[in-house]
Image (tube, rainbow, N blue to C red):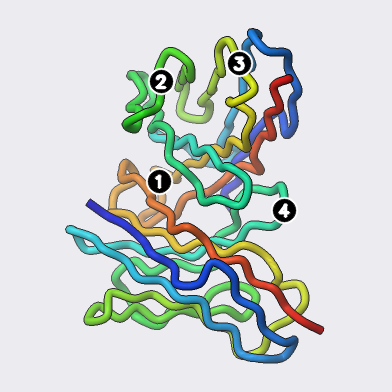
Amino acid sequence: GAVVSQHPSRVICKSGTSVKIECRSLDFQATTMFWYRQFPKKSLMLMATSNEGSKATYEQGVEKDKFLINHASLTLSTLTVTSAHPEDSSFYICSARDRGTQNSPLHFGNGTRLTVT
Amino acid sequence: AQSVTQLGSHVSVSEGALVLLRCNYSSSVPPYLFWYVQYPNQGLQLLLKYTSAATLVKGINGFEAEFKKSETSFHLTKPSAHMSDAAEYFCAVSGATSYDKVIFGPGTSLSVIP
């Protein structure tokens, strides 16, 4: 089945530093990838839609300068949390749809647990 | 605009009992509907999906869901709960294209009592 690989699974960084999270579709091509953020015991909040070869579309209230998204190819999107602060600590999950499969559901990575100290 | 509500943030059932997790949606376009399961500190796994074909959808692990347009519902059921079913369950709605956002409900935490 369709696999989305997300790396790293867990990262701890110091306040003020930047962290990059990678999301790869391993066996399918994804024109569009989605980045979600999940707070403890909460649902998934869509942060942005990552489009291959163009700028990401951010949801209302999400700082585009804080959360930089790059979708360099049909199989790779990255999320960079810039100048991280403790309030950025969260579980970040990427997802993608197989553009070659009709009615494709979202396939999810296993998430990245970010802790900012 | 699309939205999802899940009645009951926490559901507790006995092992072997029926599981019923409720989901209602709102959508301005014909919806695609999904149920996902999440285990602690993991991503989401697709249980089943409705994409305008059969209204009764069967998924993995013995789960199924029925799309009822008149009730705008897509409730998830399983005849007999197993301990391994304890997890967080999310109902989600989207449009039909690969570009459409998927909007998630708030989730329901399922506990299974031995």
Side of A63 relative to B114 (left or right): left
Q: Which image quarter holds the N terminus of chain A?
A: bottom right
Identify whether B25 is placed above or below A2: below
Q: From this viewpoint, which residue is outermost toward the left?
A: B28
C-alpha separation, residue under disc 1 versus residue under disc 2: 31 Å
Most foreground residue, A43 or B69: A43
Instruction: Name the residue located 36 percent from the left edge and 23 percent from the top edge.
Output: A56
Which chain's residue wears label 1? A
Point out the residue furthest to the right here.
Answer: B114
Instruction: Identify the residue position indicated by label 2 in the image.
Output: A63
Asked whether the residues under marks 3 and 4 belong to the same chain, the reply is no
Q: Mark 1 points at which residue?
A: A100
**Mark 4, residue position:** B40
Marks 3 and 1 share the same chain = yes
Disc number for residue A84: 3
* Mark-to-mark CA distance, 4 and 1: 31 Å
Q: Position of residue A7 (x, y in %)?
A: 68, 29
Q: Looking at the picture, do discs 2 and 4 lie on one chain? A: no
